[in-house]
Every structure is written in structure tokens, then in C-alpha cells.
Amino acid sequence: MSDKPRPVTTRRLAVMKSAGERIVALTAYDALFGSLVDGAGVDVVLVGDSLVTVLCGEESTLAATLDQMIYHGRIVRAGVRRALLVIDMPFMSYQISPEDTKRNAGRVMQETGAQAVKLEGGRVVVPSVRALVEIGIPVMAHLGFTPQSVHALGGARVQGRDPGQADRLIADAHALEEAGAFALVLELLPTPLAAKITESLSMPTIGIGSGPHCDGQVLVLHDMLGLNERFQPRFLKRYALLANDVREAVETYATDVREGRYPDAAHSFAE
């Protein structure tokens, strides 16, 4: 009997919500980190368009291109065996028309081996969500602070504090579920609103900065590992401080090279 772990599916996430099991999600942008987080047992690996801010130094996720997402999605796939692999659809790859959305998402699925894509937005993206679901492409939705709309929202701010906006977000969540989305990311929402949305939906919610009552949580891997020191939002818990370890290791290496301690006999070939 095989001891190979059973892959996580969209259906499995629905079962986890019904059973009250919390969903664990993290980002990854390459095969090495994909393998590490997958081996550690996360349920969802997200290849987020945040890769352009984390890896490329861009100011916002608006700079991500479809080719970049496909490239990183493909190499993360090489390291992920169990977790559900979801890839962000970048800005302007799904906002023009359902036809463009199907063409672009089809490329993502075909060229990466991912199991789902993620789209940001509420009722405005419902036609695109429905179009993808109808051709068999699973969609994870995303409400609250949507980074691709950072300029329209006036920055990375908590959304839904106004009663009217909260009602619109609730309506958006239900419209996305009715369109066929299998899960919903809730970013930067007040805890009571995120709880209300979560309780009212059949599909699972995955929170980031939206309190403890979502069905799961997601963080950017480099943030929670303490590699990205510039990013220090209130919701982020650092589980390591690896930037310090990296600096210390590099400084020690540099000193060893400059003082002739590396390479020594143990790290050289006699013949």
C-alpha cells in the first residue's frame, strides 16, 4: 500500500470547512520553497503576483505579467506534490472580457500544471469567474483589500468598516459563490465582517489580516520567515528571523575568504 500523501483538491477544502478543519496556505515562487512548504504539510500553495514585489522590487503587484506568473507557476509545480497549487491571474489578464480570461487562464493551467487560478474583485468579475468554471477551471476569488486595485482603494487599508461597503462585500461574496468559485480570500477586513461572510458561505474563506474566524489563513512565505524586513503590517506574525541569519552567514563567509580560512583542506581536493 502506497504511503504517498493524497493530493489536496478543491473538494477536499470544502470537506475541511464542513468538518471545521483549518486550511493552511502559503505562497511560494520557486521549486525549492515549493518543495519545503509542501513537505511541511500546507494545504494550499499560492503563486501570488506578490512575487514582483517580493522578488523583483516592484512597488505594487500591477507590474506582474502573465508570462511571469506562468514561469513561476511552472517551477513551483516542480516542487509541489500534495498541496493544491493556485496561481494568481495578473492585472489585465482577466478584466477585459470573459474570452480573454478563458484564453489567459487556459494558458496558466496548461503551461504550469496548476489546479486553480485566483481572481481579485467582486461582482464585476463574476462573468469571468462563471466563464472559467463553465470550462472546468477552478477559481479562487479574492475580496477586501485587492492589491491590483491599490490605487483606487487609496493604499493597503482595511476594507468594509463602513456599513454600506460591508453590505456590498457580503453581496459580492455570495455572487462569487453563486458563480462557482470554490474558495474566497478575505484580505484586510474587520474581524466581525470576515466572520459574518465566512458563516454565510458554503465555500471556505482564507484570511489574511481578517481575523481568526476565517476557515483558513494565508501569508506570504518571505514575510512570515522574516526575510522581508521592510514589510511589517499589524497582522503579520514572523515565525523566523531569517534575514539576520542570512546576513550573519554571508558576513562570516566573507571574513573567511578574506582571511584565507576558506577553502581549507577539508573543502579542497588533494589530487
Image: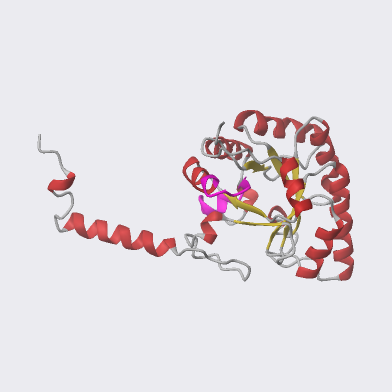
Relative to 240, residue 110 above or below: above
**Quarter holding the C terminus?**
top left
Q: Is residue 142 visible?
A: no
Identify the residue at image location x=52%, y=37%: 75
Task: Tell me how the rendering is colored.
Answer: secondary structure
Residue 72 at x, y = what percent? 55, 40
The reply, left or right, for residue 50 in relation to residue 18 is left
Relative to 97, residue 13 above or below: below
Nearest the camera: 216 or 148? 216
Give the magenta part as a residue range: 38-57
The reply, left or right, for residue 128 in relation to residue 103 is right
Residue 125 at x, y = what percent? 82, 45
Identify the residue at image location x=71%, y=30%: 106
Q: Is residue 221 covered in magenta?
A: no
Q: Is residue 149 visible?
A: yes
Residue 9 at x, y = what percent? 69, 39
